[in-house]
Image (spheres, rainbow, N blue to C red):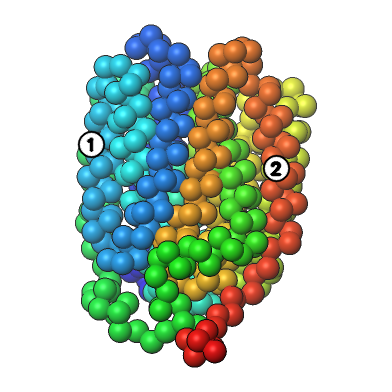
Amino acid sequence: MTQVLLCGAMVVTLSMGVRHGFGLWLQPITSQMGWTRQDFSLALAIQNLAWGFFGVFVGMVADRLGAFKVLIAGALCYCAGLLGMAYAPTPLWFALFTGVLLGLAQAGTTYAVVYGVVGRQIPMEKRSWAMGVTAAAGSFGQFLMLPVEGGLIGTLGWQAALVVLSVLVLTIIPLAFGLREPGFERRQANQPAVAHAADQTIVQALREALAQPSFLLLTAGYFVCGFQVVFIGVHMPSYLRDYQLPAHVATYALALIGLFNVFGTYVAGWLGQTMPRRKILSFIYFARAIVISVFLVVPLSPMSVYVFSAVMGTLWLSTVPPTNATVAQIFGVRHLSMLGGVVFLSHQVGSFMGVWLGGYLYDRTGSYDIVWYIAIGLGIFAGLVNLPVNEQPLVRKSPAQAIA
């Protein structure tokens, strides 16, 4: 169990840590290349959408073959995507490398794949806690990597910084060996059916999940999570520079989000062992709406930014452990990577809208205000839709009952 948690946490630390810093490249790339913020935002919007889309199919492969091969392929795609991001000559090529290829890479190296291993290897009574530990690692990656990425850009330039990161992400490959599940495919074929879940095909499992209102409500809430965190993560550095705050304020702000999210995700996973997870999720979304509202009302200063980042960081990815643990509790772990990928697809559609709409409305209005207001309204919506989620395990009919 320790090996799985350690290697899984380090993989997510690297993958999510690099990804969370992409907002730092917005101004240097657009300034040097002569592109608009919408060009940059569209590429990251495509990345989030591709991550979610490919995540469903990558999850299917991981459920079938195990995480090891998926992680190796994902690391290679990550390396190639970062190199392409560094040397793309036009917005179209930038969108293909930064959007499509890096989206595929993240699908193969982040939560859905790693959570599949965690779900299969960690006992049910510790599963929510273990997912919290893994999510906290991704948050620590943000805290760790953002100052590193900011420093690399400042000392080497934005292109060389991306080359360094492309080499760094290849360390995911040796870490993948710690997540190998020997004989995984054979065990999947021979294991006894648990609540008859092992008898399900992928299509049957997907149909079953989509027929459950609770699954759809979790999916709707996750859309909001993606919208909020990616809009803030990508556009807040530029938002702060528009108000003449120094560049280091944005770097420290995003690092604070990552630091406090270590605490927030761990606590959310820990509380999910004993509290109804739907209430945890509703609290997180309502709290986000309040925090954003206060941030927009108070005078903007480095201190207000740091306080906002610390509080928002506590709520940042704390939705991840209770959401995925609830999916595992309702449907079991047989198709967990795939079902987690479906829920995450909704998250990434929200991410697409958040990052693209931020760039689009800024270019049209010269302000991010409208997107901030949308984020507040969506937070209230997500808080409401998570309240009626039914967390009880799904009772399936046995084959004999189905025939009868």
- Which residue has dot 2 on it? 379
Mark sitting earlier along the chain (1/2): 1
In this rendering, the answer to whether 166 lies above or below 239 is: below
Pick the front one: 143 or 174: 174
Pick the front one: 220 or 244: 220
Residue 270 left/right relative to 403: right
- Which residue has dot 1 on it? 80
At 30% from the left and 16% from the top, the residue drawn is 90
In this rendering, the answer to whether 350 lies above or below 6 is: above
Pick the front one: 376 or 302: 376
Q: How many numbered marks have been drawn onto this rendered protein structure?
A: 2
Residue 36 left/right relative to 396: left
Residue type highlighted by circle 2: Gly
Q: Circle 2 sits in a helix, a strand or a loop, which is it?
A: helix
Residue 2, image x, y percentages: 37, 71
At 34% from the left and 31% from the top, the residue drawn is 98
Residue 106, image x, y percentages: 36, 45
Residue 348, image x, y percentages: 50, 43
Whether tag 1 and tag 2 are in contact, CB under 8 A, the answer is no
For the N terminus, give its image quadrant.
bottom left
For the C terminus, give its image quadrant.
bottom right
